[in-house]
Amino acid sequence: MANIEQLKEQYEGEWLAIAYDDYGTEGPQEGELIIHSLDEIVVWKAIKGDHRKIYVIYAGPLIDEDTAIAL
């Protein structure tokens, strides 16, 4: 099992699919990396039909630093 924060650092800017056992109160902390890719669609296609508990996350900022957001 790999630490998810370390995986996010290692694959910064990519989409990750991680199989996990325990979600916990703050989300999964450890898991097995199934696939990583710059293309989100590639990740979703790779895990289609996989019945494990899978955490899909983008390992980077969700918006550009120069983008303004109003809530």
Image: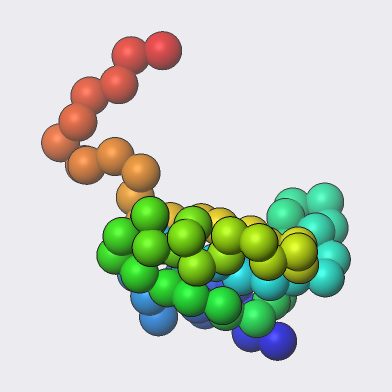
Pinpoint residue 6: horizontal percent, then vertical percent: 52, 79
Quarter of the image where one finds residue 3 = bottom right
- Residue at horizontal 15 percent and vertical 36 percent from the top: 66
State the residue in front, 47 or 62: 47
Image x and y of residue 31, in percent: 69, 76
Residue at image location 84% in from the left, 66% down from the top? 22
Q: Nearest the camera: 8 or 57?
A: 57
Q: Nearer the viewer, residue 52 or 49?
A: 49
Q: Residue furthest front?
A: 49
Please state if 67 lies on the left or on the right of 69 as rendered. Answer: left
Residue at (35, 44) in percent of width and height? 62
| Residue positioned most to the bottom | 1
Image side of residue 2 versus residue 20, left or right: left
**Residue 53 placement, left or right of 10:** right
Q: Quadrant of the C terminus?
A: top left
- Above/below status of 5 relative to 1: above
Observer able to see residue 47: yes
Find the residue positioned furthest to the top.
71
Q: Is residue 59 visible?
A: no
Quadrant of the image for the N terminus? bottom right
Q: How is the image coloured?
A: rainbow
Nearer to me, 26 or 20: 20
- Residue 56 position by quadrant: bottom right
Q: How many marks?
A: 0
Question: Which residue corresponds to the image point at 38% horizontal and 75% vertical from the top-left?
Answer: 11
| Residue 67 placement (x, y as % from top left) | 19, 31
Residue 70's spot in the image, x, y percent?
33, 14
- 24 above or below 5? above
